[in-house]
Amino acid sequence: MGNKVTALTQMESACVTIHEALKTVIDSQTHYRLREAQDRARAEDLNSRVSYWSIGETIALFVVSFSQVLLLKSFFTEKRPAYRAVHS
């Protein structure tokens, strides 16, 4: 009878040890899931800001390109002097 009690006690202590280890694993998984969710939110926020920045740069590039074309075109257009008729 004494062996059954010690075997049961060893079994219970093994179960308690396993249960504590599982609780540690669950806590670690919860921590990692929380960090993953925070990092995902940060990454999505950064992605949206990068998208807006890229759109702004594209618009600025088109405006600068268009203004440079107009400026370059103005250098090569022939300026005609205003014709003034002199009446005597």
Image (spheres, rainbow, N blue to C red):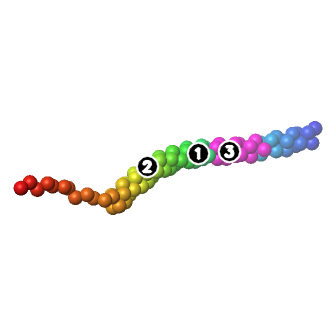
Q: Is residue 81 visible?
A: yes
Q: Pinpoint residue 10: horizontal percent, then vertical percent.
A: 85, 44
| Label 1, label 3: how far apart the Cα atoms are | 16 Å
Q: Quadrant of residue 41?
A: top right
Q: Quadrant of the N terminus?
A: top right
Asked if the residue under mark 3 is in contact with the one under mark 1, i.e. CB atoms within 8 Å, the reply is no
Q: Which amino acid, mark 1?
A: Arg
Which SS does the magenta portion mostly show?
helix
The residue positioned 33% from the left and 61% from the top of the image is: 75
Q: Which amino acid, mark 2?
A: Ile
The residue positioned 36% from the left and 57% from the top of the image is: 73
Q: How many marks?
A: 3
Q: Where are the magenta residues, as a range?
A: 18-33
Which of disc 3 and disc 2 is earlier in sequence?
A: 3
Mark 2 against mark 1, which lies toward the viewer? 2
Mark 1: few/some/many CA within 10 Å (<14, 14-19, 20+): few
Horizontal side of residue 9 vs 35, given as left or right: right
| Label 2, label 1: how far apart the Cα atoms are | 29 Å
Per the image, label 1 sits on a secondary structure element best described as helix
Which residue is labeled 1 in the image? 40
Q: Which amino acid, mark 3?
A: Gln
Which of disc 3 and disc 1 is earlier in sequence?
A: 3
Per the image, label 3 sits on a secondary structure element best described as helix
The residue positioned 64% from the left and 43% from the top of the image is: 33
Horizontal side of residue 2 vs 25, given as left or right: right
Mark 3: few/some/many CA within 10 Å (<14, 14-19, 20+): few
- In the rendering, which numbered label is found on residue 29? 3
Q: Quadrant of the C terminus?
A: bottom left
Q: Pinpoint residue 83: horizontal percent, then vertical percent.
A: 19, 55
Q: Residue furthest front?
A: 88
Q: Pinpoint residue 47: horizontal percent, then vertical percent.
A: 53, 47
